[in-house]
Image (spheres, grey):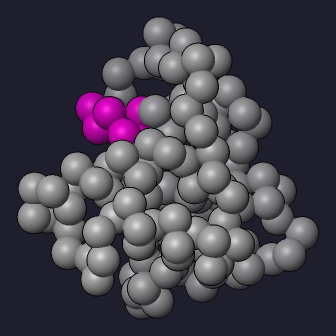
């Protein structure tokens, strides 16, 4: 399975947060799965870090890539095909970062790993947690 991690899933995973369901940990660690973190998630982390909403042990432009590599999580760039999906996406969810992750999952045939119930309103494959 090809998985795209929602930003909170990535952060919970790398910090060992107990909020992360064991099923998510198992999916991320399954060697048969390809796991990705979007450049959109790095953007979201930087914004939250700069506004003081997300404390990190190092600046996000260092911390996130280091953790991504440490945990063998691939990077997913934001491309035009993904952005074009936005014009066809209903406005069920107002979070722009989540909406773009949905678009990327749709455009790249990825399963989104999230606990965000609002995302279930979209026709995107989600790993049920």
For this orientation, the residue located farthest to the right is: 32
Which residue is at a point 41% across and 68% down the rendered structure image?
62
Q: Can residue 5 be seen?
A: yes
Rendered view: 14 above or below 76: below
Q: Is residue 4 left or right of residue 27?
A: left
Q: Quadrant of residue 11?
A: bottom left
Which residue is at a point 50% across and 45% down the rendered structure image?
39
Q: Position of residue 25 (x, y in %)?
A: 63, 80
**Helix, strand or loop: magenta stretch:** helix
Dividing the image into 4 quarters, which one contains the C terminus? bottom right
Rendered view: 8 above or below 70: above
How many marks do you count on the picture? 0
Q: Position of residue 26 (x, y in %)?
A: 71, 81
Dividing the image into 4 quarters, which one contains the N terminus? bottom right
Q: Is residue 16 magenta?
A: no
Q: Position of residue 76 (x, y in %)?
A: 63, 45
Tell me the magenta residue range.
Answer: 94-99
Q: Nearer the viewer, residue 59 or 43?
A: 59
Q: Nearer the viewer, residue 119 or 39?
A: 39
For this orientation, the residue located farthest to the left is: 52
Which residue is at a point 41% across and 53% down the rendered structure image?
42
Rendered view: 121 above or below 44: above
Q: Can residue 112 be seen?
A: no
């Amino acid at each position: 399975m090809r998985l795209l991690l929602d930003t909170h899933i990535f952060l919970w995973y790398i910090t060992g947060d107990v909020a992360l369901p064991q099923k998510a940990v198992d999916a991320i660690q399954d060697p048969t799965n390809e796991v990705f973190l979007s450049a959109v998630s790095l953007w979201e982390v930087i914004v939250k870090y700069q506004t003081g909403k997300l404390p990190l042990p190092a600046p996000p432009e260092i911390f996130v890539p280091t953790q991504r590599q440490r945990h063998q999580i691939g990077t997913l760039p934001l491309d035009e095909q993904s952005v074009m999906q936005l014009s066809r996406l209903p406005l069920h969810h107002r979070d722009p970062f989540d909406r773009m992750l949905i678009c990327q999952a749709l455009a790249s045939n990825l399963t989104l790993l999230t606990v965000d119930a609002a995302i279930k309103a979209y026709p995107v494959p989600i790993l049920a947690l």
